[in-house]
Image (spheres, rainbow, N blue to C red):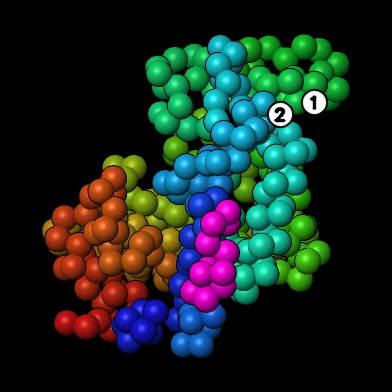
C-alpha cells in the first residue's frame, strides 16, 4: 500500500474471493484498514464469486450447491451460479454485506455475466454453448412469455437473459445501498460474446448506483486502442452524466509488454478525453505474478502504467 501511495495512486481495489470470504475475513479487514490508514480509497470486488463475476478464482459455494448452477442449452449443468436462483442471489448479498463490513468505500460488481462458454463448454462456438436453461430460468421464462423456453437463442430468449442479468445487478445495487454502502458496476464491453449485459441504460438507472465502469482491454480483444477505449469511455461518461454517476474506466495492465508503451498512454488519454477521471488499472505490478495473464517484462510495464496514470513512478 505504501508503494501505491508513493507512486501517486489514490485508491486500491482489493479482491475478496470466496477463499477470502470463507477463510481470511479478519486479514481482509486488516488489509482494508491499512489501505485507509495510508489514505487510499478502497473498492472491494467479488473476484470470480460463484463464477458469476470476473476474476480467476474457484468456487466452494458452487461445489456445495451444484443445483444452483447454470445449465447450457444442451442440458449440461456447470459450476456457475444462476442469477435466476433466489438462493444464489441471497449468497451474493451475504458476500456484499461482508464487503461493506470490511470497510469498502465502493463495492465493485466486477463483470457480472452468464457463464463464459470458453471456460465451461467443450465446444465454446457450438450453438448450444449458452446458458441458462435451468429450472429457475425455464419457470421464469414460462411465467413471462406463457410458453416453454426454447433451447435456441430466439429474440425472446436473448431478451430474457438480458433482463435476468440486469435485474440481478439492480437487486445487488439496491441491497448495497440499503445497508449503507456504495456500488460500482463494471460492465463488460459488449464485444465479448454472448454472456454480457448489452444494454447499459437499465443498469445505469439502477436506484442507488454510485459508479458506472467498464474495462475496455484493447489488446486482449485485439482492437484499436483509441477507438475502443475512447468509444467505451464516451459511452460510460454519457450514461454516467445522464444518471448523476461517477464514470470509471479500467486500463489494461496485463498481457502487455514494454513495446505497448504508446498504446498504454493512448488508452489513458482516450479515457481522459472522454471526461473520465476515475481511472484504474488491472492489476498491481502489471500482473507479473500471475501466470495466466502473462505480462512481458512486468517491472517495465508497471513503470509505464504508473507514469501514464499518475505521472509518478519509482524510476
Ligand atoms: Zn438458470
Residue at image coords 67%, 58%: 96
Q: Which residues are magenta?
A: 21-32
Quadrant into which the C terminus falls: bottom left
Quadrant into which the N terminus falls: bottom left
Helix or strand or loop: what does disc 1 sit on?
Answer: helix
Q: Is residue 186 visible?
A: no
For residue 206, above or below residue 222: below
As rendered, which of 183 and 82 lies closer to the eye? 82
Gap in angstroms between the C-alphas marked 2 and 1: 9 Å
Instruction: Tell me if the residue at label 1 has its CB under 8 Å from ligand 1.
Output: no
Mark 2 or 1, nearer chain start: 1
Give x and y (percent) for residue 193.
47, 32
Dominant secondary structure of the residues highlighted in magenta in the image: helix
Q: Within the image, what quadrant is residue 262 found in?
A: bottom left
Q: Which numbered mark, 2 or 1, is in the foreground of this view? A: 1
Helix or strand or loop: what does disc 2 sit on?
Answer: helix
As rendered, which of 24 and 90 lies closer to the eye? 24
Give x and y (percent) for residue 266.
29, 64
Residue at image coords 48%, 67%: 13
For residue 289, above or below residue 224: below
Residue 221's label in the rendered image is none
Q: How many marks are shown on the rendered structure?
A: 2
Tag 1 residue: 140
Q: Is residue 47 magenta?
A: no
Residue at image coords 16%, 68%: 300
Give x and y (percent) for residue 140.
80, 25
Instruction: Tell me if the residue at label 2 has its CB under 8 Å from ligand 1.
Output: no
Tag 2 residue: 160
Q: Is residue 200 left or right of residue 189?
A: right
Amino acid at each position: 500500500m505504501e508503494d501505491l501511495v508513493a507512486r501517486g495512486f489514490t485508491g486500491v481495489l482489493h479482491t475478496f474471493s470466496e477463499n477470502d470470504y470463507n477463510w481470511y475475513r479478519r486479514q481482509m479487514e486488516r488489509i482494508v484498514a491499512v489501505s485507509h490508514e495510508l489514505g487510499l480509497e478502497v473498492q472491494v470486488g467479488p473476484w470470480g464469486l460463484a463464477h458469476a463475476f470476473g476474476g480467476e478464482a474457484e468456487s466452494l459455494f458452487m461445489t456445495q450447491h451444484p443445483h444452483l448452477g447454470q445449465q447450457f442449452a444442451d442440458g449440461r449443468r456447470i459450476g456457475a451460479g444462476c442469477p435466476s436462483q433466489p438462493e444464489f442471489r441471497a449468497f451474493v448479498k451475504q458476500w456484499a454485506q461482508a464487503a461493506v463490513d470490511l470497510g469498502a468505500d465502493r463495492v465493485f460488481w466486477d463483470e457480472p455475466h452468464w457463464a463464459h462458454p470458453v471456460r465451461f463448454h467443450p465446444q465454446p462456438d457450438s450453438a448450444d454453448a449458452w446458458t441458462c436453461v435451468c429450472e429457475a430460468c425455464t419457470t421464469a421464462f414460462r411465467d413471462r412469455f406463457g410458453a416453454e423456453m426454447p433451447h435456441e437463442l430466439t429474440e425472446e430468449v436473448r431478451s430474457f437473459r438480458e433482463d435476468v442479468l440486469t435485474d440481478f445487478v439492480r437487486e445487488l445495487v439496491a441491497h448495497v445501498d440499503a445497508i449503507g454502502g456504495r456500488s460500482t458496476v463494471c460492465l463488460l464491453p459488449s464485444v465479448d460474446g454472448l454472456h454480457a449485459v448489452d444494454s447499459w441504460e437499465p443498469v445505469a438507472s439502477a436506484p442507488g448506483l454510485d459508479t458506472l465502469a467498464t474495462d475496455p482491454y484493447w489488446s486482449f480483444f485485439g482492437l484499436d486502442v483509441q477507438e475502443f477505449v475512447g468509444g467505451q469511455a464516451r459511452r460510460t461518461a454519457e450514461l454516467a452524466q445522464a444518471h448523476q454517476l461517477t464514470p470509471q474506466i479500467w486500463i489494461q495492465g496485463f498481457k502487455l509488454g514494454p513495446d505497448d508503451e504508446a498504446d498504454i498512454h493512448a488508452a489513458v488519454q482516450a479515457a481522459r478525453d472522454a471526461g473520465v477521471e476515475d481511472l484504474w488499472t488491472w492489476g498491481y505490478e502489471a500482473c507479473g505474478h500471475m501466470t495466466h495473464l502473462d505480462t512481458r517484462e512486468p517491472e517495465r510495464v508497471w513503470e509505464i502504467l504508473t507514469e501514464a496514470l499518475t505521472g509518478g513512478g519509482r524510476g
